[in-house]
Image (tube, rainbow, N blue to C red):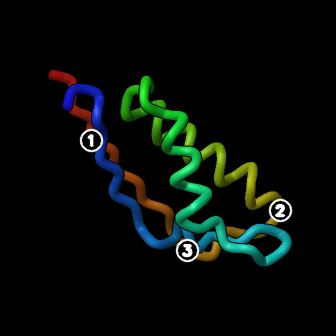
Amino acid sequence: ETGDFVLVFSDGLIEQMNEDREQYGDGRLESLLGTLAGKNPSEIIETIHKNIEDWRGNEPRQDDITIVCLKKVK
């Protein structure tokens, strides 16, 4: 359907730890994705990136994070 999007990402996104040694996880990503329906692919990626960076706090990144977003426009 128009407006649907597909997100492909590396495991570094959901396995990122925060300062409490808790992984970001699938559930946190799924909740965030539910709020991004009206955004374009660049905005979706930027929002996810900012969310995970804010969430991890001062915990160093353990792995690379790669995100690809494709959105149906017509």
The numbered mark at residue 35 is none
Q: Secondary structure at mark 3?
A: loop
Where is the N terminus found, in terms of image quarters?
Answer: top left
Q: Is residue 63 left or right of residue 55?
A: left
Query: Which circle's residue, 3 or 1, is located before the other in the chain?
Result: 3
Could you tell which of marks 2 and 3 lies nearer the N-terminus? 2
Q: Which residue is mark 2?
A: 58
Query: What residue sits 37% from the left and 34% below the top?
Result: 41
Q: Earlier in the sequence, mark 1 or mark 2?
A: 2
Q: Is residue 38 left or right of residue 15?
A: left
Eyeballing the image, is 31 above or below 72? below
Mark 3 burial class by Cα count in 10 Å: few <14, some 14-19, many 20+: few
Q: Amino acid at mark 3?
A: Asp
The answer to whether residue 42 is left or right of residue 69 is right
Taking the spot 57% from the left edge, 49% from the top edge, the residue there is: 31
| Circle number at residue 70 | 1
**Residue at the spot x=59%, y=68% of the render?**
25
Q: Secondary structure at mark 2?
A: loop
